[in-house]
Image (cartoon, grey):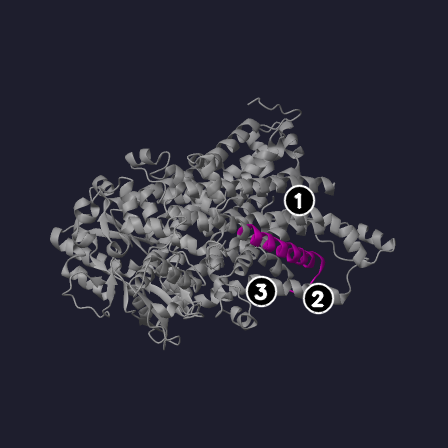
């Protein structure tokens, strides 16, 4: 494969490995995804637009993207805090806590959903104390935010953590020598270094939350216009044998995920350049 | 670790997978694709039928079960889940399979009684002592009463719930479509959670402690009481409700291809025998053979054909996109 | 994106910092972080185990010995056993091409590899139904030839491969980029063949990265619910994986058994986290080394 010449590169196997990568990617990901687009093509443009902008569908975008946005914001705040505490401070059990951060990633989503519903429903461990305060978590939009926060947390912590680890102590020393107090140092020196990674973490946790299904349906309540997420609408359409409607909405979601990933990858490139 | 080893492992695994499937295919197996609340019923039916079949023919038959929301199950069959028979919650879902040519048209006339060997209806499950004093449909629309039902768009049972409420309002003195619509809209204003399936709703009501009353299949309500303790819940049978006829049929294409037509037909006919009917009664279905004693309360039942002009029409008016159910939830302009 | 991983870090510099927060602030921050984590992570984990063992060890063990549970465990193991090696092989080749060479369109390629990560699991299952289903592209042909893909084991495996697609690759790409290619070049100059170079030079260098990627991939493969649910057909004892079986048990009002089976997956998660911690520590040494 002489398509792209590799200057000054003596390593072998480029054509073979790239070829296989593209082949496997096509078979597993690209061709199946294209089926989605082709199925939708059975709709006229007008039908497509009216399907994906029906009031109930619009409401589901609002709740899905809105809840994902809130969850990602919560995660950015607490994720940075957790990462900072894990890197900078020493306390008993730190290693265990560090390992635990990945739990949402390793715990199957259905188990997470059932468990969260068990804990936060009005008769659950936590829910019973929130109920008298008038706070309802399970079966409300708040439940969606909760589930999304749960599954998104590791992404912020794990992107910010290495960056904090690499902050040069000298920088902070220099700042303090120049008369900055601790708050100013944090604000003016450390935060700008962390900012790109926080953004990346935010975007990752957002992207993951938007597509989440398994854990949310158990805790969301699924009320039309109020707590119905977009993936659930896709399932609902399918169950009414409306394949084209389902694939149309799926296409919108797919496009969104692709754009978000592109942005994330550009952000990472930018942050890498920033770091250098 | 080297490539050769990886390849051999993969090949071995692939072989292991294919041999397991082959081993299963060598037996006579039927796949019965059904809806959620029939799990326990068909465990018993399958055992009884397998015994009877072995006595009669000497052959062994294993019946595999698949359960889920009725619409979802129908879609799986349409998409190629090889079911020899389907036993779904409503005729509309089987019609959808027939539309794709997997079942011959007129399937509902193949077996007696619209191909429904047992019927059921919609009743209320309330908390022990009935603290809200819920006796009939009117009590469900009172302010402050919280009603649990699944989403009619995804659950067959929930469609029966919805239509039962509609039929009730329609048959009240001075009842008409507009009044029925208001009644149903008011009822759904009292619904805090719409799970996607009947079992999900029962869990919400029972396990999460949400709601004052659960609209449920009669057999589900009694099953929930048996499984979860009669000291916690009780069944309230309203004065009138809907006659739910869950139909059964052979998937012609699959049965012919797999050569299982004879067993599949016998299996469904077994549901109509005294033994099959007794098992249905035991699981709180209403057998169509009225000689089989049942422990269920009497009530006035409306049929879907009389009250709504059949499933196709009911589906289109009420549950299709933009239908009356969607209008209830549409933002007020 | 970089999956939820932090493969390459420097060792934590023991603090001798000129500047840090006052002790009060420090402990306040630690307390806040710990309370947040306890509420969000520890509590769910504790809930799973407490519900699983609610009725004692015998009930717990009986729930696990049930034939349908055993067959779901078997299916999940088979799925992972096929998925992980395939994605491992793909991950290594993709990382080799991407990390060791430069070519136009690299960013697009990386984004496409990441795509399954953010595609909703519902869609991941749906696309295979659209292709292999009876109403799909090659469904009718498959049916004539009696090949079952969706609603059978191959469909479950395919959906799982899709969902776990990026994990090994995303783990190895940054690691191999960080390591550069001088060592491989030296080996080649000294007369080693391509494969020899890979197995003797590259592989030892990325060994822990691979293990790390494999366990993440494996955890996800065994735990996937949404995508598998769409393609499974839910035939008891045949096409139910462990997460699907948990849902079924739960829907049969068999809560203790549901959480007992779920606790298996939680155990798996904990083991994953332990192996991961070790792997991370080794990677750190490797980068240093």
Quadrant of residue A135 within the rendered picture: bottom right
Near-viewer residue (B144 or B56): B144
Judged left or right of residue A217, residue C188 is right
- Which residue corresponds to mark 1? C287
Task: Give the residue displayed 20% in from the left and 42% down from the top.
Answer: B259
- Give the position of the C terminus of chain C as an image quadrant: top right
- Which residue corresponds to mark 3? C39
Which of labels 1 and 2 is toward the front? 2
Q: Tell me the magenta residue range.
A: A64-93
Near-viewer residue (A229 or B44): A229
**Residue A85 in magenta?**
yes
| Dots 3, 1 in contact, CB < 8 A | no
Dot 1: within a 10 Å radius of its alpha carbon, few (fewer than 14), some, or many (20 or more) residues? Answer: some
Quadrant of residue A18 within the rendered picture: top right
Task: Give the residue displayed 39% in from the left and 53% down from the top.
Answer: B324
**Disc 2: which chain?**
C
Identify the residue at the far left of this view: B56
């Amino acid at each position: 494969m002489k398509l792209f010449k590799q200057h000054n590169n003596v390593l072998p196997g480029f054509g073979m490995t790239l070829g296989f990568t593209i082949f496997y990617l096509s078979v597993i990901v690209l061709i199946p995804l294209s089926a989605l687009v082709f199925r939708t093509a059975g709709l006229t443009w007008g039908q497509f637009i009216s399907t994906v902008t029906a009031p109930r569908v619009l409401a589901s975008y609002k709740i899905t993207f809105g809840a994902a946005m809130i969850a990602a914001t919560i995660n950015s705040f607490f994720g940075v805090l957790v990462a900072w505490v894990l890197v900078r401070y020493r306390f008993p059990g730190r290693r265990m806590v560090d390992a635990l951060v990945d739990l949402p990633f390793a715990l199957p989503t259905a188990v997470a959903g059932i468990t969260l519903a068990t804990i936060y429903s009005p008769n659950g461990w936590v829910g019973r104390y929130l109920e008298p305060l008038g706070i309802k978590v399970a079966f409300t939009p708040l439940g969606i935010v909760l589930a999304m926060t749960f599954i998104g947390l590791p992404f912020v912590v794990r992107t910010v953590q290495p960056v904090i680890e690499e902050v040069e102590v000298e920088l902070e020393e220099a700042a303090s020598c120049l008369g900055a107090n601790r708050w100013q140092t944090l604000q003016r020196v450390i935060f700008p270094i962390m900012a790109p990674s926080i953004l990346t973490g935010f975007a990752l946790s957002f992207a993951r939350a938007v597509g989440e299904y398994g854990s949310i349906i158990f805790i969301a309540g699924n009320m039309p216009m109020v707590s119905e997420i977009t993936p659930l609408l896709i399932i609902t359409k399918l169950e009414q044998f409306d394949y084209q409607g389902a694939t149309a909405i799926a296409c919108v979601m797919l496009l969104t995920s692709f754009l978000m990933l592109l942005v994330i990858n550009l952000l990472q490139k930018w942050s890498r350049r920033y770091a250098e | 670790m080297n490539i050769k080893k990886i390849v051999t492992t993969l090949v071995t695994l692939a072989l292991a997978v294919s041999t397991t499937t082959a081993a299963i295919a060598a037996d006579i197996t039927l796949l019965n694709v059904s809806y959620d609340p029939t799990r326990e019923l068909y465990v018993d039916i399958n055992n009884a039928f397998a015994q009877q079949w072995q006595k009669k023919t000497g052959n062994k038959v294993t019946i595999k079960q698949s359960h889920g929301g009725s619409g979802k199950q129908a879609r799986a069959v349409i998409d190629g889940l090889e079911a020899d028979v389907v036993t779904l919650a409503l005729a509309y879902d089987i019609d959808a399979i027939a539309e794709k040519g997997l079942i011959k048209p007129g399937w509902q006339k193949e077996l007696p009684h619209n191909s429904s060997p047992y019927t059921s209806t919609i009743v209320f499950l309330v908390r022990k002592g009935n603290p809200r004093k819920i006796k009939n449909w009117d009590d469900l629309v009172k302010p402050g009463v919280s009603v649990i039902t699944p989403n009619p768009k995804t659950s067959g049972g929930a469609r029966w719930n919805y239509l039962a409420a509609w039929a009730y309002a329609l048959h009240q003195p001075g009842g008409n479509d507009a009044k029925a619509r208001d009644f149903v809209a008011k009822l759904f204003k009292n619904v805090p959670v719409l799970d996607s399936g009947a079992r999900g709703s029962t869990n919400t009501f029972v396990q999460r402690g949400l709601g004052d009353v659960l609209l449920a299949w009669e057999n589900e309500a009694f099953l929930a009481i048996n499984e979860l303790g009669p000291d916690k819940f009780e069944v309230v049978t309203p004065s009138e409700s809907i006659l739910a006829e869950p139909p059964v049929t052979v998937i012609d294409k699959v049965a012919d291809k797999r050569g299982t037509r004879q067993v599949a037909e016998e299996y469904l006919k077994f549901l109509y025998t005294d033994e099959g009917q007794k098992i249905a009664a035991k699981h709180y279905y209403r057998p169509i053979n009225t000689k089989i004693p049942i422990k269920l309360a009497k009530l006035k039942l409306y049929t879907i054909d009389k009250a709504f002009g059949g499933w196709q029409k009911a589906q289109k008016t009420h549950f299709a996109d933009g239908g009356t159910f969607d209008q209830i939830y549409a933002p007020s302009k | 994106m970089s999956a939820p991983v932090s493969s390459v870090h420097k060792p934590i510099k023991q603090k001798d910092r000129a500047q840090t927060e006052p002790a009060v602030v420090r402990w306040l921050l630690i307390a806040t972080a710990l309370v947040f984590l306890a509420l969000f992570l520890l509590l769910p984990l504790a809930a799973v185990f407490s519900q699983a063992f609610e009725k004692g060890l015998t009930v717990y063990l009986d729930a696990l010995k049930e034939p349908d549970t055993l067959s779901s465990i078997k299916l999940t193991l088979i799925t992972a056993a096929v998925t992980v090696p395939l994605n491992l092989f793909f991950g290594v080749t993709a990382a080799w091409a991407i990390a060791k060479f430069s070519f136009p369109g690299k960013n697009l390629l990386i984004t496409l590899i990441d795509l399954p990560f953010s595609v909703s699991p519902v869609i991941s299952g749906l696309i295979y139904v659209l292709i292999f289903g009876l109403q799909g592209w090659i469904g009718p042909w498959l049916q004539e030839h009696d090949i079952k893909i969706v609603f059978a084991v191959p469909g479950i495996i395919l959906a799982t491969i899709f969902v776990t697609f990026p994990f090994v690759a995303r783990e190895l790409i940054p690691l191999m980029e960080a390591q550069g290619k001088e060592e491989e070049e030296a080996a080649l100059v000294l007369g080693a063949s391509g494969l020899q170079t890979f197995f003797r030079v590259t592989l030892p260098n990325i060994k822990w990265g691979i293990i790390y990627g494999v366990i993440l991939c494996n955890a996800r493969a065994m735990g996937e619910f949404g995508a598998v649910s769409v393609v499974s057909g839910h035939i008891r004892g045949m096409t139910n994986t462990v997460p699907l079986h948990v849902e079924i048990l739960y829907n049969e009002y068999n809560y203790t058994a549901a959480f007992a089976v779920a606790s298996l997956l939680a155990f798996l998660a904990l083991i994953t986290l332990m192996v991961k911690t070790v792997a991370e520590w080794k990677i750190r040494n490797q980068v240093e080394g």
